[in-house]
Image: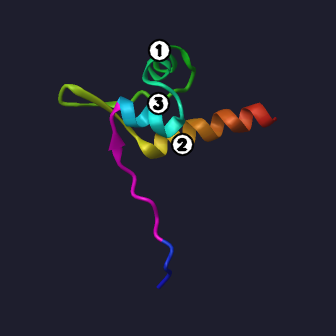
């Protein structure tokens, strides 16, 4: 067996999602409304959550388009 573990994909709230992206919460909400292709998130009861994998995929796509 390999010692390398696959990261667990989990749902995070806006505060943690912003922290993962390295931005503030207010910037996160601006991106949510204006950035094309930004992950929509999902409602979990009265709370909106985002999958970490979706956030990283958006960030990867954004950095790849900037490098080309």
Q: What numbered label is drawn on residue 56?
A: 2
In magenta stretch: residue 29? no
Which sits earlier in the primary sequence, circle 3 or circle 2?
3
Name the chief secondary structure element in magenta.
Answer: loop
The C terminus, quarter of image:
top right
Q: Which residues are magenta?
A: 5-13
Q: Which residue is mark 3?
A: 39
Residue 37 screen position, x and y as percent: 55, 26
- Under circle 2, the secondary element is helix
Residue positioned 45% across, 18% down in the render: 26
Using the image, determine if residue 57 lies above or below residue 47. Answer: below
Closer mark to the observer between disc 3 and disc 2: 2
- Under circle 1, the secondary element is helix
Using the image, determine if residue 52 lies above or below residue 34. Answer: below
Q: Which residue is mark 1?
A: 33
Horizontal side of residue 43 vs 63, given as left or right:
left
Hey, which residue is sitting farthest bottom in the picture? Answer: 1
């Amino acid at each position: 067996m390999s010692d390398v573990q696959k990261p667990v994909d989990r749902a995070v709230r806006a505060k943690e999602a912003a922290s993962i992206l390295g931005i503030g919460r207010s910037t996160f909400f601006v991106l949510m409304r204006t950035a094309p292709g930004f992950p929509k998130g999902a409602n979990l009861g009265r709370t909106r959550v985002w999958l970490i994998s979706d956030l990283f995929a958006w960030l990867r796509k954004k950095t790849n388009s900037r490098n080309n």
